[in-house]
Image (cartoon, helix red, strand yellow):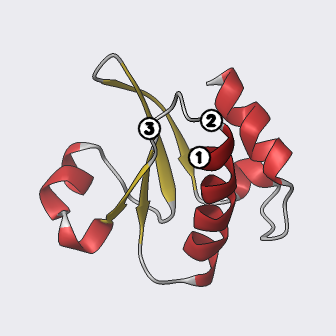
Amino acid sequence: MCLFYRASPPCEVMEKHLRVLAAAHLETKFMMIEAEKAPFLAERLKIWMLPTLAIVKNEKTTDYIVGLDDMGGVEDFDTGMLESRLIDA
């Protein structure tokens, strides 16, 4: 999981939930990249909205969670909702 972010409330919300999931799922690698400091990578992966969570399996990006729309479009979504979305991916 790679979170592309910048200093903003929606990105901080996603980061908070991912920190909880990272502690519970040690078998998964979680990382964060400040999108403006990695423009080549952000452009290559077609990151157009922040936060964007890129799901990578076997060195290939298989899915994206763009913004908070998949989480109901609200900042106070449940961590379990994000976890089940990631399991589906």
Instruction: Give the amino acid type for the residue marked by disc 1 in the picture.
Output: Ala
Q: Find residue 4 and report its horizontal and vertical position in percent.
A: 40, 59
Q: Secondary structure at mark 2?
A: loop
Which residue is rendered at x = 77% and y = 62% of the image? 73
For mark 3, what is the residue?
A: 29
Q: Is 49 on the left or on the right of 26, as rendered?
A: left
Circle 2 crowding by C-alpha within 10 Å: few under 14, some 14–19, many from 20: few
Q: Residues within 10 Å of mark 3 (few under 14, many from 20)?
A: few
Q: Which mark is residue 22?
A: 1
Residue 20 location, quadrant: bottom right
Q: Is residue 89 left or right of residue 83?
A: left
Q: Say what secondary structure mark 3 lies in.
A: loop
| Quadrant showing the C terminus | top right
Label 2, on which residue? 25
Q: Amino acid at mark 2?
A: His
Q: Looking at the image, which residue is at 46% across and 83% down?
A: 7
Whole-number angstrom distance, CA of label 1 to CA of label 3: 8 Å
Marks 2 and 1 in Cβ contact (< 8 Å): yes
Quadrant housing residue 84 = top right
As displayed, is residue 68 above or below residue 55?
A: below
Q: Quadrant of residue 9?
A: bottom right
First reached walking from the N terminus: tag 1 or tag 3:
1
Residue 6: x percent and y percent? 41, 76
Residue positioned most to the top: 58
**Residue type indicated by callout 3:** Lys
* 75 is higher (above) or lower (below) than 2: below
Helix, strand or loop under label 1? helix
How far across and down, in percent of the image, does residue 38 sit? 19, 63
Residue lying farthest to the left in this orientation: 40
Rendered residue at 25%/73% (across/down): 36
Q: Is residue 37 above or below residue 65?
A: below
